[in-house]
Amino acid sequence: MSSAFKKAAKSGQRPHRERAQPASRKKLGLLEKKKDYRIRARDYHKKQNALRALEKKALDKNPDEFYFKMIRSQLKDGVHVVKQPKDEVTPEQMKLMRTQDIKYVETKRVAEAKKIERLKSELHLLDAEGKSPNKHLFFLDSRKEGKEFDIATHLDTLPELVGRVYNRPTIATLQKETLKGATDPVQLKKLAQQRKNQYNLLRQRIEREKAMFVVAQKIQTRKDLLDKTHKVKVKKETTNSPAIYKFKFQRKR
């Protein structure tokens, strides 16, 4: 029994060695071993099974079948790639959303709003475009007084300063103090340019504050979508407003 076991034991046997490439065929390269054949055979059968499955799928295909990937996909380098819908956002908004969070955006928006209020209090929106002109009514006793009425005399100022709605000093003030540039055309032009620059700065800050408000809303919408389910899109996202979703009502305990 023990002698038969020793003869059958693998440890005592000589290892099996596959023959090498004969010297006459050495120019053809290495002789293929069984492990190489096994890899090549598995790859061949895998490809044949894939072709057979595609052929069966093509035969069983319904010609009236339709699904949205037929129009939402395109072929790139022989591979079907699904087109991803683009969000209607500007590059500045996308960069800001990716790098900063909603708290940072809200902090900057509040700071911008305070600067806007400060500029408005300084400028008072004088001669602003789109602003309805102010009306100053004078009540007189008769039509004769209306014909003889002189606005410059009534306001006690110079006729050149009547058209102003700001910085309109009286004659007494002009006699008492010398106002620099009050009637100098060069100085008036310089002041008008400075005022125009201030209005342009105010307009830019208002647009920046609106853009930050939109970014904050879009970030908040994406945050809400992570927490809630069963949503229905009511309105698509645009550059000026976030997407609007309607969520299914869930009763809380």
Image (cartoon, rainbow, N blue to C red):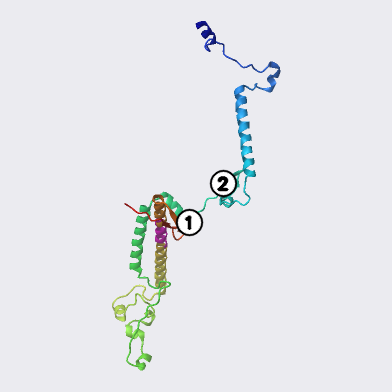
Residue 50 placed where, x, y %? 61, 37
Q: Amino acid at mark 1?
A: Thr
Residue 115 placed where, x, y %? 35, 62
Residue drawn where x is 62% and y is 28% of the image: 41
Displayed quadrant of residue 51: top right
Highlighted range, magenta:
207-216
Residue labelled with disc 1: 90
How many callouts does the rendering have? 2
Which residue is nearer to you in this view: 201 or 8?
8
Mark 1 surroundings within 10 Å by alpha-carbon count, few (fewer than 14), some (14 through 19), many (20 or more): few
Question: What element does badge 2 sit on?
Answer: strand
Q: Is 207 drawn above or below residue 253 in the view shown? A: below
Residue projecting furthest to the right: 24
Residue 146 placed where, x, y %? 36, 90
Residue 137 placed where, x, y %? 35, 84
Q: Amino acid at mark 2?
A: Val
Mark 2 surroundings within 10 Å by alpha-carbon count, few (fewer than 14), some (14 through 19), many (20 or more): few
Q: Is 158 drawn above or below residue 48 in the view shown? A: below
Residue labelled with disc 2: 81
Which residue is nearer to you in this view: 55 or 222?
55
